[in-house]
Image: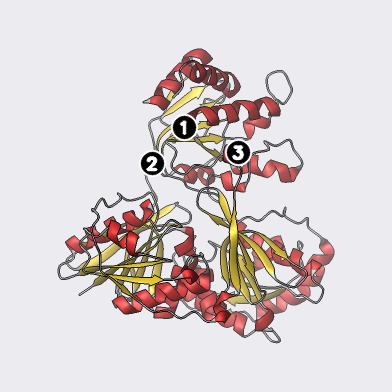
Amino acid sequence: METILVLDHTENDGSLARSAREALHTAATLHKSLAGSQIVIGLAGENVQAAANSIAACPATKYFGVTGADFIQARYATDAAAAEAICKAAQATIVVAPATSRWMRVLPGVAQRLGGRADTHVTGVAAADGKISVNRWYYRQRMESTQNRTQRPWILAIDPGSQTACECGAGTASVEIVAVTIPEAAKRTTVVGVREPKADAQTIRPDAQLLFVIGAGWTKKQADGQTHVPEAAKIILEFLHKTRASLGSSKSLVDLGGEGQAVLPFLSHLNQIGQTGATPRHPKGLSTCCHGEEPHTVGWRFVNERRAISLDPNCCWARGKADVLYVADAFSVMKKVNELLVADPI
Amino acid sequence: MLPAILDPWAGHALFEAANLAKNQPGSKVWLVSLGPKAKLQQVMMTVAQKVPFDLVALDSPANGFTDATETAAALAEAIAAIPGLDKTRLLLFGGWESASRGAGATMQIVGERLGITEQFQGVDELKVTADGSLEILERVEGGKHQVSKCAGAPALLGWATGNLPDPKNNPQVGMANMRTVMPALQKAKPVKFIGEGLSFASVALPKQMRETQVVKDKSPDDIAKEIVEWIKN
């Protein structure tokens, strides 16, 4: 009999993120298809009662919590201790957790401590004839496998955005607090804060409806033989401001700075989409002045509707990858788009 | 045949390590690398001229789906066996999604096996302060960085892309490295992976070929209208 543990951490305000509810949905679906299994919840954070109450109507039979000031920070030593203690207390054989940066830092190490295994980039979990199998991605979203394991506990880190979020209701949950004593030696690291661009300069918005991707073409010589980088920056930022889209970039555009070429000042490696960048999940994606093949395309793996603007009708990136390719000058089109959005805002 | 290179994260980790060692007198860089011996030799052709290091080579079979646990076990064993390595002063660098096909799991397991519990993933910046403590920027959700202060070594850093450019090739560095690279390759310890308990039902490339509608004959005004309508719907 499998004991399925949903392992979540609370947010700073004590709530559960959407990704935590996605993990819960995945586990609940698995529980339904796995006869004789039971589902339990494990939560780590300063105080987990509110989070537990918020999902009290889920099919879990038990709630475990590791709480206290030591578990506010996203720190390896304390997070690993909390996760390890919860897994042991729950006697978990399957652990379903959201692949947040916080859990991804520790879960493979926790699996090692427990003598189990961890699979990451999981986007599907199913059971048939009592056998569990997972779908996961390898090589940065280039290959997808279906696989199973005999080792337990088996930790599954679910890619955020890949699942439906559980909408189970609130109630009152009885949380069994698991005592974890943290020695001073485990507090050699202190999280001192989060560094982010100013609110109006933040261009990465994971929850945006639209991903706007810019390529190196924006910084190249235009029809008049000159580059127009300041104008490009103005057009791009205006579009982002009006649509609240998330900004992605090709690697070549991000790398230009290191090559001494004119750069768009608001870009960093965090904007990079593709093989060595991010593979964000957005309902729509608009690509402009991009050129590239598979390494860039993997960044679009989870973007549903895709359109592209390029001067090259045979652009190997757009053909076969985008739904619509507009053969046009992105400067002209996007200027006009901005004008239309001024006249009739979203 | 594909070229044998370090993946970008592993490459950045090496360059960051070399840069740190250059600025911290008395430091030394070991590059522990696992792969088919012939491939490792090709990798050395591309990196050995860039920064100074001592190579520790592990001769493993080419395998598209090596399990992170097994890879980590082999790497940790090789690190632990490095003669003269003071583990209390060890900064273990690697690519955050390197070694095991972008799993993002190998480094954490290596750290656990070596007893390193100061671990950081998706690192873009490391500063060593005057008192030897570390300030580390890790990527977190939403295009942000988490800033942590760590009392010092031992620590493990899984690097993202960092901020350093690729170092230029330096033949003198290459010559110095080759004195240790070739013997290391010759005595590379063979490693076998058995994939115990893991079975694959299927492995496939995603089929996402789309029927692209190519629009050639519309004015920028018309295209803009169509795009705005599409965004709003």
User: Which chain is indicated by disc 2?
Assistant: B
User: Which chain is indicated by disc 3?
Assistant: A
Decide: few, some or many residues near mark 2? Use Cα within 10 Å; few <14, some 14-19, many ≥20.
Answer: few
Q: Which residue is mark 1?
A: A319
Give the quarter of the image for residue A42: bottom left
Task: Give yes or no for contact between labels 2 and 3 (Cβ–Cβ under 8 Å).
Answer: no
Disc marking residue B208: 2
Which of A346 and A220 lies nearest the eye of the viewer? A346
Residue B62: % across, % down: 50, 68
Cα–Cα gap, marks 1 and 3:
32 Å
Compared to A91, does B6 lie above or below? above
Which of B50 and A253 lies nearest the eye of the viewer? A253
User: Which chain is indicated by disc 1?
Assistant: A
Compared to B133, does B220 lie above or below? above
Which of A202 and B40 lies nearest the eye of the viewer? A202
Disc marking residue A330: none
Give the quarter of the image for residue B19: bottom right
Give the quarter of the image for residue B182: bottom right
Which of A96 and A251 lies nearest the eye of the viewer? A96
Residue type at tag 3: Ala
For the view shown, which residue lies furthest in the right direction?
B172
Q: Residue at x 81, y 71 (%)?
A: B176
Disc marking residue A201: 3
Among numbered discs 1 and 3, the one appearing first in the sequence:
3
Element type where label 1 sits in the image: loop
Residue B93: % across, % down: 63, 68
For the view shown, which residue lies furthest in the left direction?
A35
Residue type at tag 1: Arg
Task: Give yes or no for contact between labels 1 and 2 (Cβ–Cβ under 8 Å).
Answer: no
Q: Is residue B197 visible?
A: no
Compared to A39, does A81 lie above or below? below
Residue type at tag 2: Gln
